[in-house]
Amino acid sequence: MDHFQLKNGVLYAEDIPVPQIAAEVGTPVYIYSRATLERHARVFRQGLKDVGKIHLAFAVKANPNLAVLRVLANQGYGADVVSGGELERALAAGMKPEDIVFSGVGKTRAELTLGLDKGIGQFNLESEEEGQLLAEIAAARGAQAPATLRVNPDVDAGTHAKISTGKKENKFGVGIDVAPNIYARLSKLDGLNLRGVAVHIGSQLQNLDPLEKCYARMGELVEQLRGAGHEISHVDLGGGLGVPYKPEDNPPSPADYGAMVERVTKGWNVTLMFEPGRVIAGNSGIMATQVIRIKPGVNSDFVIVDAAMNDLMRPAIYDAWHHFEAVEPTGETMIASIVGPICESSDIFTKERKVDRVATDDLGIFRTAGAYGATMANTYNSRPLVPEVLVDGDKYAVVAERIEPATIMAAEQVPDWLK
Ligand code: LLP
């Protein structure tokens, strides 16, 4: 369920007509719905109502906009961060340091230090070496860093290879076979309060089976670690729940997920931690774009729009499907390749797909753009950085401005010796 619906033939974001935002802010533009974000945050929490003690940390990488993070902070969410920059954002948005979890495969000394300085709640260690370094930095200041060890369970998430993270050949975590020995060594270090394990096997999961397999393995590991005398109080189960991109997609609901988690983790007696990203933000956002012109192609017309792969990279890099709709649909359809103006053949959003008929100057939207959309945007071809808008009922605000090439050029210099 989301709040981007047609009213009298025009697409609205909550109570604001999309053409109004397009006219006032310009296109391309990301539009988020506060009510949808809040709904998804509530539904995810509700799905876990029978699970016992939980901690929810929104995966900031999915949508790091400060206003979006504030909406989620108000819903009682903490943050899962993977860089010093994300950590600063979560704090700036009002998230409590103790609700912040620091994941990420290559945390630097500076980032570990920042996490300690800010008093964050937990570090998810990705290697023994990282654990040793964190312990050393913490011990030197007489502190103990709260931490878990991220384990690679060697489970195929059954999702796109580029967003799969839990197979043994992937770079994430330590192998589940070597985890007990690494855990034993790290747990002896003064600077660490090693209190559990963490896992995350991939994103956009369409099926609960790989997650269930993974969690069952984690249950065995917890038992083994406890058998070796370790106190395990926290298990971080990561994120990964998929969302519908096509109207016919039917991923597991948060309620299905919660029921599986309850069944598999029964008796673990720990705080279960979650790092959802896409399932909260994905369908809470759309990207609006305007048709520049239409040109005939060999197999179908090319609808050239003012959004491009730099604004929404997912189709270009994962062949991802984002549903296209006209903002004022006529009921007619067309077969079209919707493309951006960038000089690459991968700058294509739909390939010879049946879509709402649109004409020059019409507005259209791509759905499910609230996660891994604006956050992955860039300025390739010296295009502006796409702006973001948050709608709340009958009001909206620009929550990230369009950053023009002139602003970016201002940070560049031609050295004197070239002049
Ligand atoms: N926790 C960790 C440690 C992660 O690496 C991720 C995502 C998440 C949580 C959140 O996963 P989610 O609930 O959103 O599935 N750019 C790609 C997605 C990359 C996901 C990376 N890690 C895309 O556009 O599909």
Image: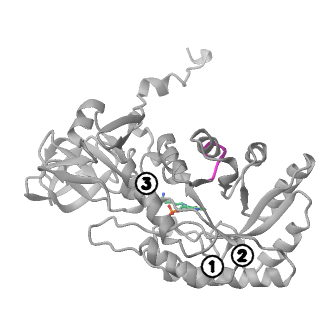
Q: Residue at x 88, y 51 (%)?
A: 143
Give the amino acid type for the residue marked by disc 2 in the picture. Answer: Gly
**Residue 278's disc number:** none
x and y percentages locating residue 154 in the rendered image:
63, 79
Quarter where residue 335 is shown: bottom left
x and y percentages locating residue 120 in the rendered image:
72, 50
Q: Residue at x 65, y 78 (%)?
A: 153
Q: Residue at x 37, y 35 (%)?
A: 397
Q: Which residue is mark 1?
A: 154
SS of the residue at dot 3? helix
Give the alpha-carbon distance from disc 2 to disc 3, as whole Å.
36 Å
Q: Which residue is mark 2?
A: 175
Reply above or below: 300 against 8.
Answer: below
Give the alpha-carbon distance from disc 1 to disc 3, as whole Å.
34 Å
Give the amino acid type for the residue marked by disc 3 in the picture. Answer: Glu
Give the alpha-carbon distance from disc 1 to disc 2, as whole Å.
8 Å
Reply above or below: 412 against 416.
Answer: below
Q: CB under 8 Å between callouts 1 and 3?
A: no
Q: Can residue 130 be seen in the rendering of this structure?
A: no
Give the amino acid type for the residue marked by disc 1 in the picture. Answer: Asp
Say which quadrant the N terminus sits in: bottom left
Q: Which residue is mark 3?
A: 38
